Amino acid sequence: MKWKRFSRPRAYLPRPARPAPRGAQSRARPPARCTRPWRRAPPGPDPARRTRDGQTQLAVHPHRGGEEPARQGHEEPLLRKGAGLGIPQPPTCKSMDTGPESTGSSDPYCIVKVDNEPIIRTATVWKTLCPFWGEEYQVHLPPTFHAVAFYVMDEDALSRDDVIGKVCLTRDTLAAHPKGFSGWAHLTEVDPDEEVQGEIHLRLEVVPGPRARRLRCSVLEARDLAPKDRNGASDPFVRVHYNGRTQETSMFEFELEEGAMEALCVEAWDWDLVSRNDFLGKVVFNVQRLWATQQEEGWFRLQPDQSKSRRGEGSLGSLQLEVRLRDETVLPSGCYQPLVRLLCCEVKLGTQGPGQLIPLIEETTSTECRQDVATNLLKLFLGQGLAKDFLDLLFQLELGRTSEANTLFRSNSLASKSMESFLKVAGMRYLHGVLGPIIDRVFEEKKYVELDPSKVEVKDVGCSGLHRPQTEAEVLEQSAQTLRTHLGALLSALSRSVRACPAVVRATFRQLFRRVRERFPSAQHENVPFIAVTSFLCLRFFSPAIMAPKLFHLRERHADARTSRTLLLLAKAVQNVGNMDTPASRAKEAWMEPLQPTVRQGVAQLKDFITKLVDIEEKEELDLQRALSLQAPPVKEGPLFIHRTKGKGPLMSSFKKLHFSLTTEALSFAKTPSSKKSALIKLANIRAAEKVEEKSFGSSHVMQVIYEDDAGKPQTMYLQCKCVNELNQWLSALRKVCISNPSLLGSYHPGVFRGDKWSCCHQKDKSDLGCDKTRSRVTLQEWNDPLDHDLEAQLIYRHLLGVEAALREKHRELSAGTGAGSVCTGPGEAPEDPLAQLLQVLQDLQEAHSSSPAGSRPSGPNRPLALQT
């Protein structure tokens, strides 16, 4: 396997003068007027409640810099009915503003917000105007999301972080790019008058008047308003403008002149006692339309004020993004059963011939989308318990068209892509157990390691003794010793991990080993079965994980330049071991020769490991799978701070650190990971998992879990996380495991009940409906998410629908020849042509989509949203 070099995206940020203070940038406003604040309204029915007839997904992918193994593809996150947002890590910037610092540089990081809700924070890149993050996230969203925004911030240790600029992409913009939005986007100035959110409930009607007809505007309530005060709340009032007049009461009446073209503007403001009032948003109405309708009432989304002049385009810098939006409609499970049964029957038969569906799918799939198709098929068969049979069929197909042993599984075939996806889905926890300690040690040591004499920099190493710098030979020897230590530790850990490897992975490798040995039985090919196993295990799984540990969830952040070089050299050594130390691999880089004794020893260890790995019988496989099914592996676990309630309200300093564990059955906690669980909450009793306002506990990283105790009484547990990423990861995990609970709440209180009222809306009834809508559909895609069979079937259907013309042409060719074989679809049914049956299934699914509630929308290709920076 060859290494692939990715060009590192760059960001260049200009150094304009220090921006004016916020007050100087704000427009002049009339003096603050104290009006009675109206409360935020409880949300109406959530349009994104758990439905099955649609799904939208957003995915974002970053550019990777530096030298690394070829990417084996990545999975696009998908959602059920709703919108999904996938975000690989935020941007690469260029010409970035230095902000208020006088050092000529910044300490930038990026915040990703969906409808003004922070969901991701990247790491800070210190002292640079060209930051590179290279992270990747995938987010599931409800179908009602409006926009995703990237805020580039400058971290300050002693004061509040400064905003350098932002890039905002609306849903319409993303939907207009079916293949994804990609390129450089200019950072724009962040104006407080444009940072608006929420909706306002208005009633507009034309009523008779004493002299002329009058326009009456009634302001009823609002919800989800932007917090403008330092305590995380606002004191809202409304100002209405029409025909040169302005009023600030909850009901307004203006005389209407027939034919007048003046627009009606309703503005929401946050009242401040000392400083200027803050703009919360506005809604503009066409009065001529009101003449025709006479009355209009509903919830209207607040819009920003974009009337002010801006700085020159690009003066704040630019952000490199790649964004892809996928919008899918997922039908009920029964609609996909004919397709699933047909594909499963093909895999079970395992026959090869011109009419087999799996080869036809591979033949009609383009190279660019083969990874996605392989991942979807693999997950579908994994959920059906047929992953091993599916991969075995692909192995046979690959071996049937391979004549030279040294080209086996070297192409981007469906077999190679499916096996890569299989290892990531089924073997990720095993990978963490083997590689985790070695990767952690490399990151902690941060040693300078270099074997290439042309790249050695002695000045980076320091001194080995008093006043004597190390020589180049000493640097090379010390580097070789460090790499030998890491490689030896990795191979030893791998040799001890046979029993830890999942049974389905071992059984799949057993099939691969046997098929290759049957295809190349001669003595000169005795290493070919071992190389076939290592081509996936080492070259396509372990080596990429060593090179990019963050992408395989081994580390929270990417490695620095020094650690990256160490990881690259270690990955090359693992690659040489995986290639069984062939002369061709040794000839590529002669400077790797100091590692050859360890590599040769590693080859013997690896062959012994593979021999034991594939030595698993059917009975042992079933026993291991049965034992694994009885366990409830944690979905997420880690330390959190729990808040204990006491008396009438929460105490501000009563957080206690405990170890929490979330499984598919309960949320439990204990003093330490190894101690006995002191309490647990059954998942069936959880009704919501939401964020808590910053003003409630003085922290923006607090969440609340609303549940019912054994007596059926509602309870709330407050948990504090260390950062916004950990907060959203826990919220996502809780929401995903509780998504099917029938008693999920549609609204909640983002504050706390302190004294005799809620801190968010000042309601005095503790059991009153919440003042904000829940966000149970906003989740992050994780590697250990449970399989979604219906979604995978929908994605397979969507792909097959795109190549339907090619399938029909193939069917005509086969019908004119010897036929396409047959398959039994059920008891008592006559055998049918499987390709003809597949085309009929596609037609039935197309009709089901057309008749579904979401089918009234124009159908189109998958629209994933991917943001890359």
Image: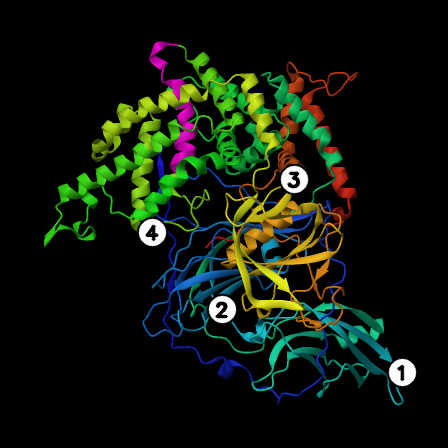
Check disc 4: other Cα within 10 Å, few if <14, some if 14-19, many if 20+.
Answer: few
Check disc 4 and report the residue beneath it: 560
Q: Which residues are magenta?
A: 522-544
SS for callout 4: loop
Task: Name the residue located 65 percent from the left edge and 26 percent from the top edge.
Answer: 343
The residue where tag 3 is placed is: 791
Of marks 1 and 3, the one in the foreground = 3
Q: CA distance from mark 2 to mark 3?
A: 37 Å
**4 or 2: mark nearer the eye:** 4
Residues at marks 4 and 2 touching, judged by CB atoms closer than 8 Å: no
Q: The residue tagged with tag 3: helix, strand or loop?
A: helix
Q: Amino acid at mark 3?
A: Leu
Q: Position of residue 406 (x, y in %)?
A: 37, 21
Q: Is residue 20 magenta?
A: no
Q: Residue at x 61, y 39 (%)?
A: 786
Ranked by sequence position, the earlier of labels 4 and 3 is 4
Q: What residue is shown with label 1?
A: 208
Dot 1 and dot 4 residues touching (CB under 8 Å) = no
How far is mark 1 from mark 4, CA to CA?
72 Å
**C-alpha distance separating marks 1 and 2:** 47 Å
Q: Amino acid at mark 4?
A: Asp
Tell me where residue 639 appears, x and y as whole percent: 51, 52
Q: CA distance from mark 4 to mark 3?
A: 38 Å
Q: Are marks 1 and 3 in contact (CB under 8 Å)?
A: no
Q: Left or right of 616: which side holds 467?
A: left
- Whole-angstrom CA distance, mark 1 to mark 3, is 55 Å
Q: Earlier in the sequence, mark 4 or mark 2?
A: 2
Residue shown at the point (25%, 39%) measured from the top left: 482
The local crowd at label 1, few if under 14, some if 14 to 19, many if 20 or more residues have their Cα within 10 Å, is few
> Is disc 2 placed on a helix, strand or loop?
loop
